[in-house]
Every structure is written in structure tokens, then in C-alpha cells.
Image: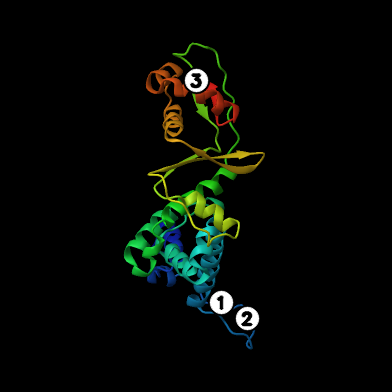
């Protein structure tokens, strides 16, 4: 009888796939004897290694698809090594590979801090966060339908389109991302702002990137926070009348009560 509960077995198996062997788990794996005498019989260790190799390969390929510009900048060899290290440290908790590795930017930040050879890629965590936002925008669920029962500014609020991703960056990562996607990675990037604000929105099933100024970014954040139209007007003044119609017209926001 197994010394591990079902939950422990599942966790041990996931640890094995991420490169963290569990002697207790491996002791439970049987050798494969369903071979004729002339065939090589994979023992328990080899059977686990096959699953591990497939798991790492699938997650590495998924990371390349999720972060193609990071891959392009780092090169395949460096990115592959970082991907393997990430997989070993970070267990995937989602059944769909399109939704795993959301925290890859945090891993990159730690890797850059720890490895001198990566110091020149100080902007990479923000770039990875941008790539994730662009990717996840495409997979957003459909919007809910809101019934507006009152036009009173004290009651009117705004719902965010499910695909919208709002970003504030210290570095001009949109330029870096855009240049590399268009095979112009060697072109100079202008860093002439203290912060950069962007909104990503899915239009006709295609994610689109829009630059926002700081006032628009702050207004959008307060809309997301659930402030009423009156509260927004008190906080932002004329910025509301100038931009709320734009936000609604672009389908970034919807009215609700």
C-alpha cells in the first residue's frame, strides 16, 4: 500500500516532472515488463524520466510561444536554460499551457539580479509583463451584459472590457517589443519619459496596443476601481468629459450601475 495520500502522490509526481526527485514516489513506480526478451525494458527511473522530458519540452515550447520577443532578444540557448530553470522552480497549476507562466517576469527579475551576464537585460521583466498582457488579452472571456437602470451620475459606474490590459512601465518596452516584432531590434529606442502607459484591447479578435497619457491612465484606474461618474468628475475634472466618451467609443469601458 502506498505511503502517500492521493494529494501527496499528485504533488510528488509534479515535483518529479519539474526535476525534483522523490525517492518515496519512485519506489512506487513499477518496471515495465511488457516487452519480449529482445527488447530493452525501461526501469522505473527511465519511465519517470520519459514523462519529465515530455513535460519540460512542452512547457519550454509554451514559454517560447508566450514570450517570443524575450526569446528573440536573449537568443535560444540562454532563453532555453532560463526556461528549464523556471520550470524546475515553478510548478504549473493550470491545465492549459496558454495560461501558465504568468509570473515569468518575476522569475526574470530574480535571474537578472543573480547573474552578472544578464545585467544588460534590466528591462526584460517589464517586457515579459507586456508580452503576457498582449497574450492573455487574446484569450479573454466574453463580456457580461449590464443593465443600466439609472442615469444619475451618482449611480453610473463603468465596467472594463474583459480583454483590456492596463500597463505602467518604467522602460519603453513597447518600442522594444514593436521593433523586435518587425525585425528592427537593432534600431535605437528613445527613453524620454519617466513612465510609459499603455492599454491593450482585443478588437475583432486581434489585440491592439494604445498609448495613454498619465491623466488617462489614472482615470482608467479609477473607473476600474468602481468610482461613480460624479466621483470621477470630482477627482479628474475636465479629463472625464474629454476621455470617458473616448473610452466608451473604443469599447474599453461599458456603463453599469
Residue at screen point 51% across, 26% down: 243
Label 3 vs label 1: CA separation? Answer: 71 Å
The residue tagged 3 is 241
In the picture, the disc for residue 32 is 1
- In the current view of this chain or complex, which residue is farthest to the right? 204
* Vertical order, 216 against 154 (above or below): below
Residues at discs 2 and 1 in contact (Cβ within 8 Å): yes
Residue at screen point 42% across, 47% down: 192
Instruction: Say which element carries label 2.
Output: loop
Q: Is residue 134 visible?
A: yes
Label 2 vs label 1: CA separation? Answer: 7 Å
Residue 219, horizontal then vertical, whole percent: 44, 28
Q: Nearer the viewer, mark 2 or mark 3?
A: 3
Binning the other alpha carbons within 10 Å of mark 3 as few (below 14), some (14 to 19) or many (20 upward) gives few
Is residue 113 or residue 65 the one in the foreground?
Answer: 113
Instruction: Say which element carries label 1.
Output: loop
* Vertical order, 133 against 29 (above or below): above
Instruction: Say which element carries label 3.
Output: helix
Amino acid at each position: 500500500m502506498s505511503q502517500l495520500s492521493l494529494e501527496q502522490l499528485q504533488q510528488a509526481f509534479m515535483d518529479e516532472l519539474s526535476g525534483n526527485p522523490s525517492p518515496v514516489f519512485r519506489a512506487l513506480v513499477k518496471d515495465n515488463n511488457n516487452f519480449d526478451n529482445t527488447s530493452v525494458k525501461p526501469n522505473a527511473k527511465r519511465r519517470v524520466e520519459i514523462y519529465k522530458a515530455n513535460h519540460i519540452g512542452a512547457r519550454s515550447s509554451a514559454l517560447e510561444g508566450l514570450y517570443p520577443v524575450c526569446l528573440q532578444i536573449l537568443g535560444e540557448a540562454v532563453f532555453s536554460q532560463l526556461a528549464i530553470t523556471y520550470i524546475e522552480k515553478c510548478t504549473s497549476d493550470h491545465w492549459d499551457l496558454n495560461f501558465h507562466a504568468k509570473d515569468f517576469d518575476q522569475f526574470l527579475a530574480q535571474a537578472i539580479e543573480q547573474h552578472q551576464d544578464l545585467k544588460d537585460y534590466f528591462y526584460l521583466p517589464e517586457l515579459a509583463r507586456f508580452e503576457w498582457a498582449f497574450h492573455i488579452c487574446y484569450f479573454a472571456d466574453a463580456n457580461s451584459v449590464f443593465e443600466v437602470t439609472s442615469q444619475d451620475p451618482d449611480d453610473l459606474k463603468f465596467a472594463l472590457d474583459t480583454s483590456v490590459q492596463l500597463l505602467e512601465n518604467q522602460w519603453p518596452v513597447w518600442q522594444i517589443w514593436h521593433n523586435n516584432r518587425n525585425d528592427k531590434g537593432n534600431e535605437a529606442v528613445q527613453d524620454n519619459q519617466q513612465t510609459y502607459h499603455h492599454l491593450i484591447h482585443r478588437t475583432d479578435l486581434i489585440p491592439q496596443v494604445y498609448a495613454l497619457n498619465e491623466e488617462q491612465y489614472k482615470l482608467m484606474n479609477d473607473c476600474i476601481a468602481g468610482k461613480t461618474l460624479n466621483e470621477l468628475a470630482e477627482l479628474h475634472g475636465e479629463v472625464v468629459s474629454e476621455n470617458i466618451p473616448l473610452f466608451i467609443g473604443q469599447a474599453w469601458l461599458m456603463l453599469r450601475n
